[in-house]
Amino acid sequence: MSDTVFRRRTALLTAGFAAAASLALTACGTGQDTGARSTSTAVADSGNSSAATPKGNTGGTEAAASGTDSAVTVSKPGRSSTASKGSTGSKGSSGAVTCTVANTKVTAQTVTRPLNHLLLAVKNTGSKTCYLYGYPAIDFQDAQALPPVDKDTQPQAVTTLRPGQSGYAGVLLSAADGSGSGGYTAKTLKVIFQNRALDFVGSGVEVPLPAKGVWIDGSLTTTYWLTDPADALD
């Protein structure tokens, strides 16, 4: 083969390889460019992508912060309710309180059965439920000490009075057989309430008695506050 022919073939092969390499590079560049344009288009079209928000733009945060009226579920034991997020809601009644002379009316009534008994009634005159703790302190005129409570009458739960409801305590005034000592006729009575700590609070409330008074002696005893007048006199 002549030297001239060999050089021509070499030149043609070199040119062919160069053209093929150029085409390959062009194809790769076109693919990368197309992928980049596709990604950019997808981001632009998705209105909720964080990548679509320019750096430094707080529009998404402001929208979330302004949604304070959105409803959220508030769970409590045994129930669930819906409340407005960020809202304190309207305040209702604040729950039960202690029965005192300020939110009750106390009356005393003598009964024919059983003998020598007085029935005390406490009516809740307030707007809230109240707890009638313990038992009443019975302060009769000229009494040397407050009478004891019959422990067998203690209820299993605190006597609770809704507005308008009444609680009761029975008072044994004197021994039915006349065996009580130190008997006399008392014409005035004060009733003193206990608080949650079972301390007697305040000076009590004056409770009207029959005009002739009531006979009391050393047998004087009271029951706990109860919900049923029959139980209080039993």
Image: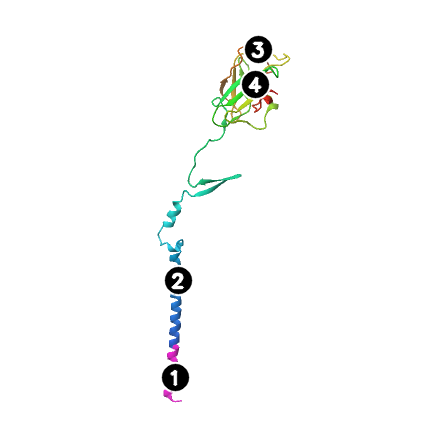
In the displayed structure image, the side of residue 234 where residue 24 appears, left or right: left
Query: Disc 2, disc 3: CB below 8 Å?
Result: no
Comes first in the chain, label 4 or label 1: 1
Q: Residue at x 61, y 23 (%)?
A: 152
Q: Residue at x 55, y 19 (%)?
A: 120
Residue position for label 1? 9
Query: Disc 4, disc 3: CB below 8 Å?
Result: no
Query: Disc 3, disc 1: CB below 8 Å?
Result: no
Q: Secondary structure at mark 1?
A: helix
Residue position for label 2? 38
The amino acid pointed to by label 1 is Arg
Residue placed farthest to the bottom in the image? 2
What range of the chain is rendered magenta?
1-17
The amino acid pointed to by label 3 is Tyr
In the displayed structure image, the side of residue 126 where residue 13 appears, left or right: left
The amino acid pointed to by label 4 is Leu
Where the N terminus falls, by quadrant?
Answer: bottom left
The stretch drawn in magenta includes residue 16: yes
Q: Position of residue 66 (x, y in %)?
A: 38, 45
